[in-house]
Image: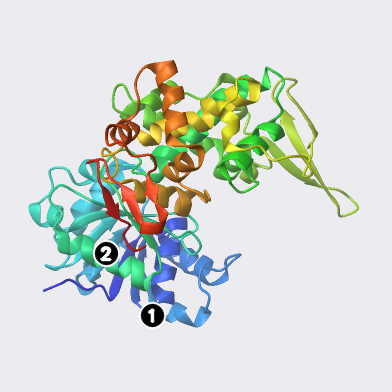
Amino acid sequence: MARKINSAVVLGGGTMGAGIAALCAQKDNQVLLLDINKEAAEQALDRIINGRPPSLDDPEKAKNITIGTFDNDLDKIVNYDWICEAVIEDLKIKRELFEKLEPLRRDGSIVSTNTSGITLSDITGGMPDRLQQDVAVTHFFNPVKVMRLLELVPGKQTTPDVTDALSEFCRNVLGKGVVNAKDTVNFIGNRIGCYWILAGLHYGIEALEEGFSVEEIDAMISQSMGLPPTGLFGLVDLVGLDVMDLVSKNLSANLPSGDLGLKVVNLPGSVRAMIDRGQIGRKAGGGFYRVEKLDDGSRKSETFDLITGKWRETIKTDSGSTPVTLDAMLEDDKQGNLLWQIVGGTLIYAADLIPEISDDIVNVDRAMRWGYAWSEGPFQLLDRLGPGKFSSRIVSENGTNPKMLTALNKAGAEMFYLEEEEKFFAIEGTYKHIPAD
């Protein structure tokens, strides 16, 4: 009999846990939200109802949420279909909680962990077979209410009915775009997205010393890739340099040897200095950018100049000028070389990660569109640029192509997608129908 999810326990009332609980409640599911103590649970519920913006569209739906604590109410998980752990990104804490909950849940209940990068095998390794068969990663993106992406990652023993039930519930009830990923460090979205950010910091800081401005780099990356105007440095400010520091350390420790990401994983010294003085982004008043409210009520936008170490007025990029195209990365000039290192490097990285992180290009492209707001995924960008041109440039520099370009060339194919036929190129060398999203 197929498993069904009609009720959920969320363990942890932080930003992600509260968001998941609110979304389930909004869709009329009974939710048990547990946290470390009563005060923390009450604060989580208050943020769900009264946050800015609130996590619930309809505050009346809060009646679907019952709160409690790990110490007093964990045994109540026996009454729920899905148990979603969403505590802090700490392996030891997650494992301890899993060990406590496993004897308390009923047969047939589904368990998942909301983690952005810790592998499921690390979290559940050595635990009972019953848990190993019933567990998966459900990686929601923040804010849960807004972001479409949900990365679904099974373990080696996870039974298909578990992932089927989670996929059906998250897609059809919660309204998420479900991407099937594999149990590798940072999964799909953050594996590629963090490479892109770290490469941007690594090569972007070098470009500042060659005369580029932060604003110019953000504009050329955003325009060439079709990204939101926030740009790369603006996104880092939103995420926080402290978070990127943790990401950097996690990747440094866990990326496989020989991974291209190891070249850019360490933060530049000037960025490290920003972290040391607390200049980590929007939540701390500024990072690469800041906005100051003046006495007359107006706002002044400033940019931090890493070369002089001082704040200056933000330069408005000329909206009337010709936008930078993706083809610019193939030009032999300073702009082209910088784009090749950051954007081109990211496309090379993505094209070499199948089948390691995903079985196909469709899941990779959807992860980047739904999780990072790219207008096109890496393989769609390669089609726009021309895989043949891109491949020739790589071979001229490195002598070898990444896996997916090698497969495309070997099959004599020219594009990753056949849009009119609604097909995509598979690493086996054939075209397959694009699955519904």
Quarter occupied by the C terminus: bottom left
* Res. 66 visible in picture: yes
Query: Of the residues shown, which amino acid type is indicated by label 1?
Result: Asp
Colouring chosen for the image of the structure: rainbow
Q: Where 365 sits versus 397, above or below? A: below
Disc 1 and disc 2: Cα gap in Å? 17 Å
Q: Residue at x 27, y 53 (%)?
A: 432
Residue 225: where, in percent of width, then height?
56, 41
Q: Which residue is mark 2?
A: 166
Q: Where 322 sits versus 45, above or below? A: above
Quadrant assignment, res 331: top right
Q: Secondary structure at mark 1?
A: loop
Residue 310: where, in percent of width, then height?
76, 26
Q: Where 167 sits versus 333, above or below? A: below
Q: From the viewer's perspective, is the residue at label 1 or at label 2 nearer?
A: 2
Quadrant assignment, res 110: bottom left
Q: Which residue is mark 1?
A: 28
Quarter occupied by the N terminus: bottom left
